Every structure is written in structure tokens, then in C-alpha cells.
Amino acid sequence: MRPSRAGGLLAPPVNSPYLLIFIVFFLSITTQCQAWRPWAHQDHPNDTLSLGDSKKFEGSSEFVHLRYHMGPVLTANITVHPIWYGAWAPSQKRIIRAFIRSLSPEGAAPRPPSVAGWWRTVALYTDQTGANVTRDVRLGAEKNDRLCSQGKRLNRLSVQHVIRSAVSSRTRPLPVNPLGGLYLLLTSDDVSVDDFCGQVCGFHYFTFPSIVGYTMPYAWVGNSARACPSVCAWPYAVPAGYGGPLAGAPPNGDLGVDGMISVIGHELAEMASNPFANAWYAGDPSFPTEIADLCEGIYGTGGGGSYTGQLTVDHHDGAAYNLNGVGGRRFLVQWVWHPALNYCFGPNALDQ
Ligand SMILES: *[C@@H]1O[C@H](CO)[C@@H](O)[C@H](O)[C@H]1NC(C)=O
Ligand SMILES: *[C@@H]1O[C@H](CO)[C@@H](O)[C@H](O)[C@H]1NC(C)=O
Ligand SMILES: *[C@@H]1O[C@H](CO)[C@@H](O)[C@H](O)[C@H]1NC(C)=O
């Protein structure tokens, strides 16, 4: 076993003003938490295409009314199809592939807490027939769009054109799998996407038949290394002048990609539990708060505000993480809302 210590960003020392602020924070979580974020947060209530945005705020069981809205969840085996948009190094692809392979029980890391254990919370969500979200998540065929077929500035509609190209390409198109296929568009660090960095680090939605030819869940996640690591690769990067200690080093040695892992996990969890924006979410349908939105920035016990919660920090290389994956890989992935416990949960929780 690797020696480790619990660590985190800005752990509030007891007997300090932070403690009081923390208490006030928890008492006023629904209205005050936004001011507490180390990152910018702006609501965008008119944007109906922003369902499933990777927004950043926390929830508290007292005020969260997560509801099931009768639509389907992903009960069939899930196959994730990455679409690599722009220039991706083989080492970067390997990190993301390893994370996806770590999700299914077969890929479970020998040492808990594992990525597969994290997905078990997602698999607690059911549809109206009582069928669970599948625990079987596989890495499927991949597609490269190295030359950026839709340019280096994407918006929410051109993203769908990228997916259309990938499934209708003359050479090795991605399989069309409306039952369990998830299309994961990953943009390199020189590609901009509407609202990237300002409001979102990723989003999920479903494709329109008029563009793609099918209705299938998809997500976009961007590499923020160049544009805004302190927003989308937090807690490995923090805003300038923030002052607090860093949580630790990216466990796979790539700030942007290690930061993307948590956002990918976020979007996969929400796609599985709310693939067509009519299943599991809290709040208004035009601005839903989904199972991962509720737990953004929380990676371990005690997390909330700008505190990550208890992480493992490797004393050899300083890597901060909370989950083990295939091939000895380590990942940091935010928690998701637990439907029975009614709070954010992960397999690294200390009090289970
Ligand atoms: C939302 O839409 C309403 C009416 O369409 C408009 O008055 C308002 O300014 C919009 N708000 C934002 C944040 O765009
Ligand atoms: C899902 O995958 C498992 C193997 O992990 C297989 O046994 C099962 O038949 C698959 N189910 C469907 C519906 O494809
Ligand atoms: C399916 O979901 C129910 C309700 O959350 C849960 O009790 C059960 O353990 C889940 N089954 C699996 C296989 O995850």
C-alpha cells in the first residue's frame, strides 16, 4: 500500500475565521454559495441548450429536491465513443481511455476506492420500470477530427455537426447506437467552445435528427490547459492571487487532461441518469440541476465551498486523487448525488 495523507485545498484551520465562514456557508448554502466559489459562476437561465452544463455549485440535502420526471435512463450497456477534435498526444488519449475503461466492474482497480465503485452510485438511479442505470460502461470505437472540420471555434450547433461527420464519415464511421452509445467530443486546448471557461467546462445534451440523423446522447468536454485551468482544472490550478495551498499535483502528469477527467465523469453520470433531459434532475426544466451539478467541487469527505474534501496525496510524487483505475492509474473525480442518502457521495467517503 502506498503511504498517503489526507489533503485538500484550503482546509480551514480550526479556531480561525474560516470556521465561522464555513458554518455560515452551510447555513446559507442555497443563496450564498456562489460568492464562495474560487471561480466565476453565472447562471444562464435562458439558454435552453445548456441542459447538463458542467455548472459549478454545491447542494445540500435540505434544499435539494431531486426528482424523477418519468423519462428513460441508460439501462442498456453503455459504449463511449471519444471524438478527438484537434491535436491530441497519444499520452493524453491513454489517460482518458484508461479512465473510461476503469468505469465497468471488469475494469475495477484492485484497490478501492475505485472508479467502478464511483459509478455504482450512478447505477442506483432507476427508470419507471425499476430498471437501473447499467454498470457496464465500455470504451468503444473512436474517431479523430485532427484538422478541426468545423474550425477552432465551436458553438452548440457546430458541435453536433462534428458528431454528424463522425457517424457519417466515409472511412470508418462511428457506429450509430441509439440504445447505449454515448458520443464524447473532446476538444484540444487550442479550440474554443461557446461559454467554455466563463460558465462551463463541459456539457451534455442529445443530438437532433435534423442535424445528425438520430437522437443520441452526447457530451463535450474541453481541455482547459491553455485557456482557463483555474476554472476547469481546479483544484490542480487556482486563480492568480488566490493564495491558498494547491491540492496537489495532477496524478497523470497532465494538468489539462487530469482536470478533464472529473468533467468527463460529471457528464457521463448525468448522461446516464438524464440522457434526454426528462429523467433525474432538480429544479426548473429549463435550467435543470442534475446529479453531478449538485456535487461540483466535492471530491471527498467534508468537501464544499472551496474545500475539495479529503483527498489522497501521494507522498512520493505529490499527486492528489481520490480514485484508483486500471493499470495503476489514479484519478480525481467529483462526487455525485446519492439518491437514497440524499447527499453527495463517493467510494472514498470516510464514514461508510
Ligand atoms: C431572458 O429572456 C428574457 C425574455 O426573453 C429577457 O428579458 C432577459 O433579459 C433574458 N435574460 C438573460 C440572462 O439573457
Ligand atoms: C452487456 O454486456 C454483458 C457483458 O458484460 C453481456 O453479457 C450482455 O449480454 C450485454 N447486454 C446487452 C443488452 O447487450
Ligand atoms: C438499483 O437501484 C436500486 C434503487 O436505487 C438499488 O437499491 C439497487 O441496489 C440497484 N441495483 C444495482 C445492481 O445497482
Image (spheres, rainbow, N blue to C red):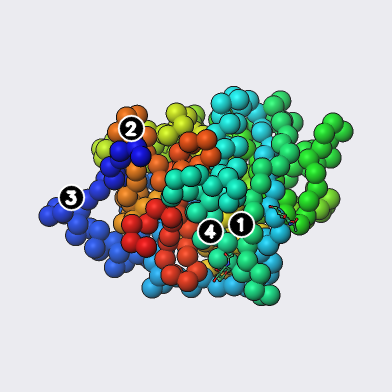
- Residue lying at 49% horizontally and 33% vertically, measured from the top left: 256
**Mark 4 or mark 3: which is in front?**
4
| Label 2 element class | loop
Residue 62: x and y in percent read 38, 73
Q: Earlier in the sequence, mark 3 or mark 1?
A: 3
Marks 1 and 2: which is nearer the front? 1
Q: Are marks 2 and 3 in contact (CB under 8 Å)?
A: no
Mark 4–mark 1 contact, CB under 8 Å? yes
Cα separation, mark 3 vs mark 1, equals 39 Å
Residue 101's spot in the image, x, y percent? 60, 42
Disc 3 target residue: 13
Tell me the residue that label 1 is attached to. 135
Task: Please tell me which residue lies in front, 88 or 77.
Answer: 77
Q: Amino acid at mark 2?
A: Gly
Res 127 → quadrant: bottom right
**Mark 4 residue type:** Arg
Q: Is residue 59 above or below residue 116?
A: below
- Marks 2/4: CA–CA distance: 28 Å
Determine whether the residue tagged by mark 3 lies in a helix, strand or loop. Answer: loop
Q: Earlier in the sequence, mark 4 or mark 3?
A: 3
The answer for how far apart the CA atoms under marks 2 and 3 are is 21 Å
Task: Of the two numbered discs 1 and 2 on the same chain, state the one appearing first in sequence.
Answer: 1
The amino acid pointed to by label 3 is: Pro
**Residue at disc 1, CB closer than 8 Å to ligand 3:** yes
Which residue position is annotated with label 4? 120
Say which label, 2 or 4, has the lower sequence index: 4
Give the class, few, some or many, for how many residues have Cα within 10 Å of label 2's Cα (few <14, many ≥20): some
> What residue lies at 57% left-to-right and 55% top-to-bottom?
269
